[in-house]
Amino acid sequence: MRSRRASWTVLGLTAIAVALATLSVATAQVGVPKGKGGAGKAAKGKVKRREPAKKGMPIAADPLENDAAEGLDKAAAGMVHYRLKIKANDGTSLNLVYYPAYPARLGTNAPVIMMVHEKERSSRDFEEPIAELKGQGFAEHMQSLGYAVLAVDLRGHGANARKPLSSQDWKLMVDDLQAAYQFLVDRHNRGKLNLAKLGVLGIGEGANLVAAWANMPGGAVSSEGRTSDLGAMVLISPMADGEGFLLRQVMSALAPRIPQLLLVGERDAISADPVRAVRPIVERPAAGLKLNRVELFDTSLHGYKLLWLEPKLTSSIPKFLEGTIKLKATATWEPRYNLTPVPYDSIQLVRSAKGKEAAEKEKEPKAEEKAKGEEEKAKKGEPAEAKPKEQDAAEGAPAPKKKS
């Protein structure tokens, strides 16, 4: 008797367990959305399908799209750039000028180049109009070709706090470039550019500095275990010894792994001989990359003057970057783990001359659309749009008298 009761007890508990499991499955199915993009109805309203998070897209609001940012025009059209500040690893404030890729729809396909000036100069060297570029600065010219551009003011230079610089300050500038790179990591994760298409350009001492940064363990590396994002390096008038950074010392290591273009005036008393000395290393077929190139120009110009005044130089650089990073087939976009995010603030928007023209055109209705609208009004018997007083006067119509 007891065994029979125990059997019934087991069967009863089993039945209850099955019933509960069935109820759970049914409840779960009610909450699952049905149809494409639809949502199933639960007891209390609709339950939406949980959308997968976009990889790499940060949760924080974009400072460059913040209406409170100084001088910011969220509806900015055409080519613009931003002046902003970041903090270096030691807390020093650094000024940057950022040119978003144009047109903006390039997004995650946009290549990017960081530009570094020479000693006692500033990022303004990349803004000054160049005759061969029809009055555009070099940074703006590269922006018009579809690149995002970041021009850096080195500590103690440009818009940064000015002070006498020691050899230790120059060593810290290598870390400053890494901080500027971390800013680009943020823009990358927001889908505004592709760090897999990163290049760097340096002039004079700045050329030696970017070479030292590229050769530094962790240079242009967003997180541990990832290889460097640098895919191209342009050195204009590099020096044998640029504030403690020796050119020959790093070329042997860099030539086999980063495509590079060295540009120098062949009568440049400072840089011609050092560049000739490393040319066999850079262009050596066995160790160097086939894309590596050294170009000498028939001039004695050095540094920023070579950039501004040598007509062939401004065409050599885009051609080199196009073959190394812009059209790079393997440069797929993927998020970066930004372990050391760099905050940026004091943002100011600057609209280029072409950007202003584009904005004005966008505000004005197109002539064809305006004419079509007038025709539609005429068909409906509605009065045509009144002409401006200035236009009436130009057509000989008497302007209305002002009331006293």
Image (tube, rainbow, N blue to C red):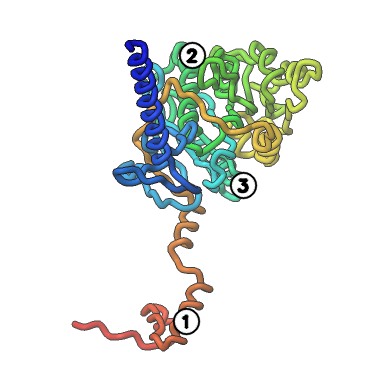
Q: Is residue 377 visible?
A: yes
Q: Whole-Å distance between the Cαs marked 2 and 1?
A: 69 Å
- Location of residue 388 (image quadrant): bottom left
Q: Residues within 10 Å of mark 3 (few under 14, many from 20)?
A: some
Residue sitting farthest toward the front: 1
Residue under label 1: 376
Amino acid type, residue under disc 1 in the picture: Glu
Residue sitting farthest toward the right: 285
Which residue is depicted at the point 36% across and 11% down? Answer: 3
Which residue is depicted at the point 71% across and 35% down? Answer: 323
Residue situated in front as seen by the camera: 22 or 396: 22
Residue 391 image point, x, y percent: 42, 79
Residue under label 2: 171
Numbered label attached to residue 133: 3
Q: Whole-Å distance between the Cαs marked 3 and 1?
A: 45 Å
Which residue is depicted at the point 58% across and 46% down? Answer: 144
Under tag 2, what secondary structure?
helix
Mark 2 or 1: in front is: 1
